Image (spheres, helix red, strand yellow):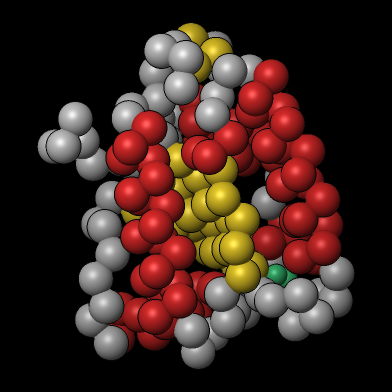
Amino acid sequence: MSDFNPKIVAFVCNWCSYAGADKAGALKLNYPANVKLIRVMCSGRVDPQFVMDAYREGADGVMILGCHPGDCHYRTGNVKALKRYKLLKKTLSQFGINDKRLKLDWVAAGEAALFQKVVNDMAETVKELGPLHITGYVEQGGK
Ligand code: FES
């Protein structure tokens, strides 16, 4: 399974995490090319359906990256994201999808190295889990 390169969709908030990703790029900090960023205005904008659609469309892992608690530009969007994340983790398990395939984290605009770390850690975690094969939303293989 060593040649498996997981497809990861990362929803990044415009004001913090996207800027952190941008800075990581400017500093030439490496992270896997198959991590696809989707820029949203706030982590609170990420509807749970977006996450499920990402899996359905072939993502092996999904990340939601937002501003640190207290720093959300819409005050409580990241709090909403955290609540949804906890529910989503339970939902994934019910569908037979290992909840490690979903990760929420906070990355500020200046935290390029942190962005690189959380993305690389997620890629490594999903690589260990292997590809996500879903029928409907049910993962096969028992992982
Ligand atoms: S604006 Fe970044 S999490 Fe809300």
| Snapshot quadrant of residue 37 | bottom left
Residue 64 horizontal/vertical position (percent): 59, 56
Q: Nearer the viewer, residue 111 or 59?
A: 111
Quadrant of the rendering where the N terminus is positioned: top left
Q: Quadrant of ligand 1?
A: bottom right
Residue 15 location, quadrant: bottom right
Q: Residue at x 46, y 22 (%)?
A: 143
Q: Residue furthest left?
A: 3
Instruction: Tell me where residue 44 appears, x and y as whole percent.
Output: 75, 59
Task: Kindly tell me whether residue 134 is visible in this rendering.
Answer: no
Q: Is residue 47 left or right of residue 36?
A: right
Image location (x, y in percent) of residue 111: 48, 84
Task: Determine whether 24 is above or below 62 in the image.
Answer: below
Q: What residue lies at 50% left-to-right and 73% top-to-bottom?
A: 18
Determine whether 140 is above or below 82 in the image: above
Q: Is residue 131 left or right of residue 103?
A: left
Q: Position of residue 91 (x, y in %)?
A: 72, 28
